[in-house]
Image (cartoon, rainbow, N blue to C red):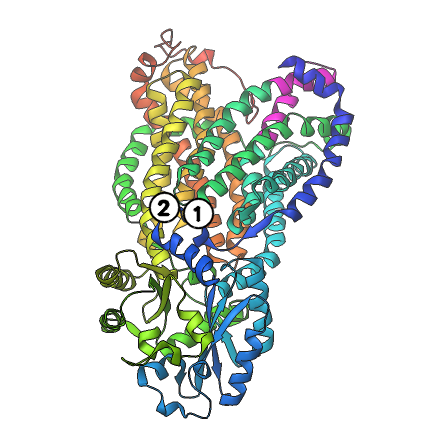
Amino acid sequence: MEKFGKTVVKLRIPILILALILLIPSVLGIQATRINYDMLTYLPEGIDTVEGQNILMDEFGKGAFSFIIVEGMEDKEVAELRQEVEAVPHVDSAIWYDSIADLSVPKEFLPDKLKDVFVNGDSTVIAVFFDTSSSADETIEAIEKIRDITGEHCYVSGISALVADLKNLCEREEPIYVGMAVLCALGAMLLLTDSWLVPFVFLAGIGITILYNLGTNVIFGEISYITKALAAVLQLAVTMDYSIFLWHAYCAQKETYKDNNEAMAHAIKDTIVSVTGSSLTTVAGFLAMCFMSYTMGMDLGLVMAKGCVMGVIGSVTILPSMILLLDKPLTKTMHRSLIPDLRGAAGAITKHYRVFIVIFLIVLVPAAIGYHNTPVYYDFTKVLTGDQMSEETGEDFLFATAEEKLKANFSTATTHMILCDADLEREKASEMTKKIEALDGVTNVLGLDSILDAGIPEDMLPDRLRDVLKDENYQLIIINSEYRVSTDECNDQIEAINSILKEYDEDGMLIGEGPCTKDLIEITDKDFNVVSLVSIGFVFLIILLSLRSISLPVLLVAVIEFAVFINLGIPYYTGFTMPFIAPIAISTIQLGSTVDYAILMTTRYKLERLEHDKKTAITEALSYSMPSILVSALSFFAATFGVGIYSNIDLISSMCNLLARGAMVSMMSVILVLPSFIMLLDPIVIRTTVGMKGAKNQNPAKNILPHKNGKLA
């Protein structure tokens, strides 16, 4: 490793030149990476809802579906509008009542159940099918074009309209996320580090590796908008430690070696050892997300694991090259650390360790209850708006206004679709339709058998309408429901519809946002448990191998999981409902990225314990590690908290707020709870840890080792 450090020092100028050159393909890669805004596309292949969507596209040439709600327009104007909409590229068909009957036929002559689908007072709806998928770029462009055509008295609903609003808002907010994360992290580091200039150098080095990470995402073809929005913020938060490790190691080595190049070579060697071990748990936490059936976990996990690795590489190549280049101004801008000597606080914690153990036991039960009852939502409308939509943000959420209009005027909160056998007998199809219409919450059903009375041949229908509802293999039935997706009522209704469908067609499929969301609920419930167990297993194994102890991995994982329980349990008591992906992601990210605090303290404890009694060793280890833990946790908090406060996208805001709080809760757990349990279990730790049999039992206070606060050896 020392040879590697000397090579980096020798080639520092070429390294910086290469680093800058590589930014060019990175920026091009960022531009070439497609962003996916549809969270339902990450459902696993093989389930009926996904297969049904594929059949709808393959057989009918239809993917996305929307309603256009029109208010205060004459029938002739609506008919002209429908024709304009149908002419928009990638609109497969637009269905209104003029698709069924001539405008000369008064609406009053239409059957009530058919009229209710399209008309209510001065409001009417046009059903629009697209020939591309819900989140396809072509569909989003078509939505924007339709909005331009329809004007202010028309509203476009549906998942594609949501995606369009989400895309516009993300593209506007994402640069601000990064800016806020940088400013907040910079403010924290200016206060917590010992140089006024070094935080800027840290951010420059980390910024380069962030661009590399985002640019290399082109190998995946596309990433989710969540990954894009969080990648830079998370990479800044979790890799900041690596820069701090190198800087502290370099400052320490400069006291030993007068030559800066030699000091940096040794600092790189020390940093590689520290950072590699530290990053393993973080990488493991992100990789655990790849075990989710809901593949958005893999999307975020792979990108962030890659970002951590790039952060490590940058911290031992690019950053040391920059520090050596700027050594003189860095030295001139150094100042006394603002972090006070924490030996007294460490002594108080070890002295009163029983108090913190009691607090742990008292808090554990309600934290566990809250954790296991974490309130989450699956309604994608709330991904943007949360529980409420303010008037000032209403312009950003045009789809939400359309959804409310559809609900108020037509009692339709969601739309399901049935794909059943085209050869299903008319009598049976009609019987099935009537049973579905009779279900609670079903407002109307649109299919061949709801349009045609018994005995009227299908040839009586206009070709364009018949082509929408039937082809050689399947017929399509549209079901409007007054229940919102993800609610118990909607899920019960879906089960009832499926039960009726299977009576008449065992191979029939129920598709749409509601059925997909029901599958999502069932899949992510399992994923939460799987990811938690896998991440705990990975982190446990890494600690086991690095600390060579049976007891310490149990203790460290338990302390961080306690912090996770508190963090994810708080919403249960505050009534805050999180997006479904948040607890899955937060549980593994918080464990993987903050267990480093515990590893740092415990590693120092092992060294001190060979020289001192348990109380002295733990006090020394705690006072030594607290400054580094404070800097790391507060930097993590700063990088994520500002984004959480600013973002209008509820999913991004919720996750960043949880990450910020998680860093602080983990910090407090490591500082207060971990040393208390080591005090209690010290004899067990010694007997179950390799190399600790020579630990002293007496208390030679005069032998307390001097150390420098916040400086890593």
Residue 441 visible from this viewpoint: yes
Q: Where is residue 404 in the image (x, y as percent from the top left)?
A: 42, 73
Circle on res. 698: none
Secondary structure under the numbered disc 2 in the rendered image: helix
Q: What stretch is highlighted in magenta?
A: 242-269
- Mark 1 is on which residue type? Leu
Q: Is residue 348 magenta-colored?
A: no
Q: Name the residue located 49 percent from the left edge and 60 percent from the top edge.
A: 134
**248 or 150: which is nearer to us?**
150
Using the rendered view, name the quadrant where residue 662 is placed. top left
- Tags 1 and 2 touching, CB below 8 Å: yes
Image quarter in which the C terminus is found: top right
Q: Where is residue 235 in the image (x, y as percent from the top left)?
A: 56, 39
Using the rendered view, name the quadrant where residue 684 is placed. top left
Residue 383 visible from this viewpoint: no
Q: Is residue 268 magenta-colored?
A: yes
Would you call the spot at circle 2 few (<14 residues within 10 Å), some (14-19), or many (20 or more)?
many
Q: Name the residue located 71 percent from the left edge and 15 percent from the top edge.
A: 262
Examine the rendered structure and indicate whether residue 280 appears above or below residue 360: above
- Mark 2 is on which residue type? Leu
Label 1 vs label 2: CA separation?
8 Å
Q: Name the residue located 30 percent from the left edge and 15 percent from the top edge.
A: 683
Examine the rendered structure and indicate whether residue 271 appears above or below residue 479: above
As drawn, the residue found furthest toward the top would be 694
Circle on res. 658: 1
> To which residue does mark 2 refer?
568
